[in-house]
Amino acid sequence: MAAVASLADPPRIALVGNPNCGKTALFNALTGARQKVANYPGVTVERKLGHFVSPAGARVQVLDLPGTYSLRARSPDEEVTRDVVLGRFEHEPMPDVLVCVADATNLRLHLRLVIELKKLGRPLILALNMMDVAEKRGCRIDAAALLAALGVAVVPTVAIRRGGIAGLLAQIDRTVAVMGPRGAAAPCGWTEPSAHDLRGYHREVEAVLRDALRDAGRPSLATRRIDAVLLHPAVGLLFLLTVLFLMFQAVFAWAEAPMELIDAGLSALQAAVAAVMPDGALKSLITDGIIAGVGSVVIFLPQILVLFFFIQILEDSGYMARAAFLLDRLMGGVGLHGRAFIPLLSSFACAVPGIMAARTIENRADRLATIMIAPLMTCAARLPVYTLLIAAFVPDGTVMGGMIGLQGLVMFTLYAAGILSALAVAFVLKRTVFKGAREPLLMELPAYRLPSPRNVLIGLLERARIFLARAGTIIFAIMVLLWFLASFPVPPEGAAGPAIDHSFAGMLGHALAPLLAPIGFTWQIAIALVPGIAAREVAVAALGTVYALSESGDALESSLAGVLAADWSLPTALALLAWFVFAPQCVSTLSVVKRETNSWFWTAVMIAYMTLLAYAAAFVTFHVSTALLGG
């Protein structure tokens, strides 16, 4: 039963539409930074809610629903959209107005959903988005005829252009002004359409198109020429690899200056706090636990934002779908469905949305195979660990005549190792556990478009907010707990060695040391791996805390990278990098695997096979590098 909106609540509109119709760009244009992202209660589906003030001065709530092709939901995210629209979602007020966002360049595909929503009898506005692209293609839509054929308000929009949503804002004001009392609407009595109904929808779509679509247009000559190059099996793949390579070079080159500023600020803060506080447990907690621990993660924010900047530019430009087509043959070679590319690509940011994105794969065996390998893609949480170790052990030099940064080259190699290992595991799974015929990839290529600076900025600000909130909550709590374990009990009178040796954390590290010694890990690394189970990036903060409490004097005047370079051998560092390529996932990822597969069995399988791969990779790396480079 849906929650009923209070009469005092602002009117709520819901954005509904097919995937890739420009819904998120429209949501950003309406709300700007006045939005928040969370999950729906009880399901791992993202919920975006924002607000704006209309030209008439009304405060309006806007909900961005997951993309769907029909109310005949075939995946969990489509079920959420259906249930919110129909008023079935518990604790979620029913929308007062539905705005169906349609890509004007492909009206035929989107009209089916418009007709379904119209039959609900709810206030409905059709936003013809990307009208600028449609006009450039020679597509001519008669908005008046479309309104007459559908009987709903029709508004052309260009979500990425200033003033491109003025007509939609005015229509929202008109619709809100004439709608009935708030909270009076009852849940819709919708039933799933039969095959006869679907044929009727198809006939209705064709009739509307005959009346309203004057010219379907065609892709521009420039688009066809660009695709002839970027979709070429050899040249296109080379271009994709070059883009990815340059992206990882930029992660180091562009982020260096802001990282130095953050580092200087944190060092000054730590010194200022240390100067005014008396020696004792509280001073140690604040300087060694909180500032050193949380700060050692926050410093990597610039690199994470550079990575997401590139990913967002590629998505907004329309190139990501081309990349999916380019890699479809490669995916098919290991038995994966072509749609697996999108979940795997999402996993570069975080395995959680990557695993959730596998819902678009209808075949259960293909979906499970994709879920099982998604965590092998190098997520952003690994980036702080990679960056720390690369900075400590890889010289900041260049190769190939100064054209390529050596640190960026190593980073690219680590990402490539994750991709290749994922494909290798998929190859084994699809020929053993998840046998079955492979289905072809069917995907529509979106039009090329210039990314909107506003949308890119909003996306980066949202990513920064999520990262800093994680640093201020999960990582903060873990660091306080780790500081306590590393500081107590205090060493007995006259005890030798650093105090951490006598602490709970030291006891745990020394207990795990024999298990990890064959792969070259120290007892400090053993301590860092344990909180890293909660969140991978915490391993860096844990190392900062452990070394702050186990080193003294001049060692603490250097950065953590310098301390590690002095304390570890190169084979140990390489083994730890190999470990994190395959390392078992964080708790949040494993919980999503449990929810998406509805099985503890597959969660346990993931933990087991990734742990074995990580240990084996670290073992081989340590012993081979020791033999080649020395201890």
Image (cartoon, helix red, strand yellow):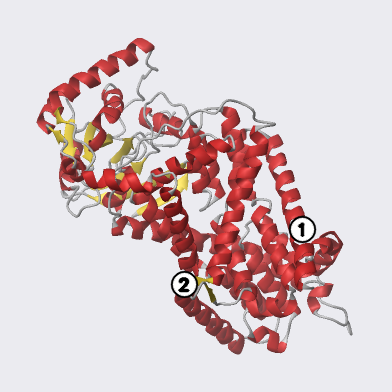
Q: Residue at x 53, y 49 (%)?
A: 347
Q: Residue 233 at what x, y percent from top left?
A: 43, 44
Between discs 2 and 1, the one toward the N terminus: 2
Q: Residue 545 at what x, y percent from top left?
A: 68, 73
Query: What is the three-letter code of the residue carrying label 2?
Result: Met
The quadrant of the picture occupied by the N terminus is top left
Give the alpha-carbon distance from disc 2 to disc 1, as whole Å: 31 Å
Q: Residues within 10 Å of mark 1 (few under 14, many from 20)?
A: some
- Indicate which disc residue 620 carries: 1
Q: Which quadrant would residue 8 be assigned to in this image?
A: top left
Pick whichever, 154 or 212, lies toward us. 212
Label 1, secondary structure: give it.
Answer: helix
Q: Residue 219 at what x, y percent from top left?
A: 24, 40
Query: What is the three-letter code of the residue carrying label 1?
Result: Val
Vertical placement of residue 469 versus 282, above or below: above
Pick whichever, 565 or 416, lies toward us. 416
- Residue tagged 2: 403
